Image (tube, rainbow, N blue to C red):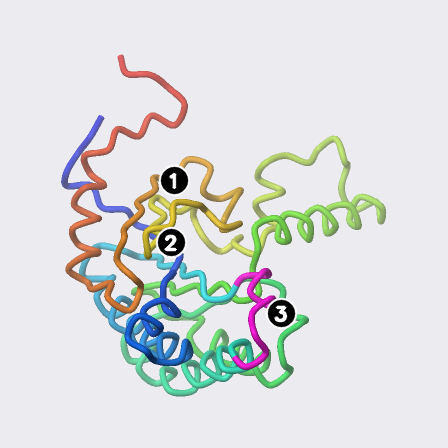
Amino acid sequence: MSDASVTPRHVAIIMDGNGRWATQKGWPRLVGHRKGSERVKTIVRAAPDLGITHLTVYAFSTENWKRSTEEVLGLMKLFARYIQREAEALSKENVRMCFIGDRKRLEPKLQELMAWIEKRTENNTRLTLTVAINYGGRDELMRAARKLAQQAAEGLIDPDAIDESMLDGALDTAHLPPPDLVIRTSGETRVSNFLLWQAAYSEYEFTPILWPDFTPEVLAEILSRFGHRDRRFGGVKT
């Protein structure tokens, strides 16, 4: 059954196209990433008024280490700067900030900043902003499997008792409901190793708009279409 009044509570976004946006204008790719970080702030501020309670954004994948050293280092500095500059605003706007992904490869200073802002905003309730850094769906599933295997080896759990809820709890996203809607910008139509388990029954929207040009108005249009989708979760109409 479709209902145009239904709003997805958890929206996940693959923020693609920053580099292309800059290249098309003859600018360095990092200019596009800086513009993209500004766009994140705009969407975060608009999301609650659109009915969104959880917003998850794909900032840096496990595969993005293949990019140039200059670009990777620039992105890491951009992440740190965002945390430092937005801490006060996030607190005032009652936004909780969390991170998913394997943090061990990140610089210790960035790890400290991530833990600091998570602690500072942990009691905020208007919106949960989750940022995926050094995240990959396969990597996440592998780490969760290892965690459960270790618990089984230590006799803490019965391997035969492992079910979907236990795997859910071992994932980075244990604090989140499944995404209702996954959006990818830039015209690409692949999921790129993002929330592979969690998005099993999510709706997808692919837009040609590059992330730096993705406005709250575009988001609102996509959300309005969501209510017309017939979500059966494997069932059939009666």
Q: Which type of secondary structure does the marked residue at label 2 adopt?
A: strand
Crowd band around label 3 with a 10 angstrom C-alpha radius: few (<14), some (14–19), many (20+):
some
Q: Quadrant of the N terminus?
A: top left
Q: Which mark is residue 45?
A: none
- Mark pair 1, 3: CA separation: 26 Å
| Three-letter amino acid code of the residue under disc 1 | Ser
- Mark pair 2, 1: CA separation: 10 Å
Between discs 1 and 3, the one toward the N terminus: 3
Query: Which residue is depicted at the point 41% across and 35% down?
Result: 201
CB under 8 Å between discs 1 and 3: no
Reply yes or no: does residue 67 show up in magenta.
yes
Q: Position of residue 108 (x, y in %)?
A: 64, 82
Q: Position of residue 8 (x, y in %)?
A: 28, 46
Boundaries of the magenta span: 61-70
Q: Which type of secondary structure does the marked residue at label 3 adopt?
A: helix
Query: Which residue is depicted at the point 49% across and 63% down?
Result: 132
| Three-letter amino acid code of the residue under disc 2 | Ala
The residue wearing badge 1 is 202
Closer to the camera, 60 or 49? Answer: 60
Between discs 3 and 2, the one toward the N terminus: 2
Task: Give the left or right position of residue 108, taking residue 39 as reference.
Answer: right
- Mark pair 3, 2: CA separation: 20 Å
Q: Position of residue 166 (x, y in %)?
A: 62, 42
The residue wearing badge 3 is 103
